Image (spheres, rainbow, N blue to C red):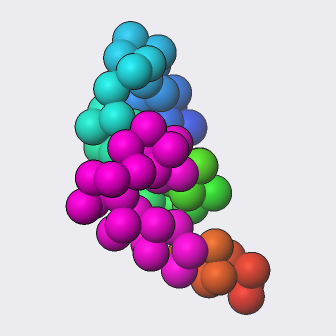
Amino acid sequence: MDAKWAMRIVTNCLEINVQDPQMFRCVAYFMLEIGAFEEAIALFRRVQDKLPAEPQSFIVRISSSSLSLLLSCL
């Protein structure tokens, strides 16, 4: 299975659970694994918007900032 099909399948999961920040986080980590960095950053930021006080949101904030910096250098 190629990355585009895999991405399509996991984003369908997001459509089923639109309000579930944990689902967004899981899909974002999957996006990182397949190299879809910009999509992962967007999903991590949605988690951060939905749950700003959750401890993992701070990790997400740092991760997405680091990824943004890395992508700007490429």
Q: Position of residue 20 (x, y in %)?
A: 33, 26
Q: Residue at x 63, y 57 (%)?
A: 38
In the rendered structure, does residue 51 fall within the stretch colored magenta?
Answer: yes
Front-most of residues 23 and 74: 23
Q: Residue furthest top?
A: 16
- Residue drawn 65% across and 82% down? 69
Q: Is residue 15 above or below residue 73?
A: above
Q: Which residues are magenta?
A: 43-66
Residue 47, given in percent of the width and then of the height, sits at 43, 44
The dominant secondary structure in magenta is helix
**Residue 74 at what x, y percent from top left?**
73, 84
**Up/down of 5 relative to 51, above or below:** above
The residue lying at 33 percent from left, 53 percent from top is 53
Residue 38 is at least partly visible in this image? yes
| Residue at the extreme bottom | 73
- x, y percentage for residue 23? 31, 33
Figure check: 49 above or below 5 = below
- Say which quadrant the N terminus sits in: top left
When asked about the image quadrant of residue 22, the answer is top left
Q: Relative to residue 37, is residue 32 drawn left or right?
A: left
Any magenta on residue 12? no
Please tell me in which quadrant of the rendered image residue 63 appears: bottom left
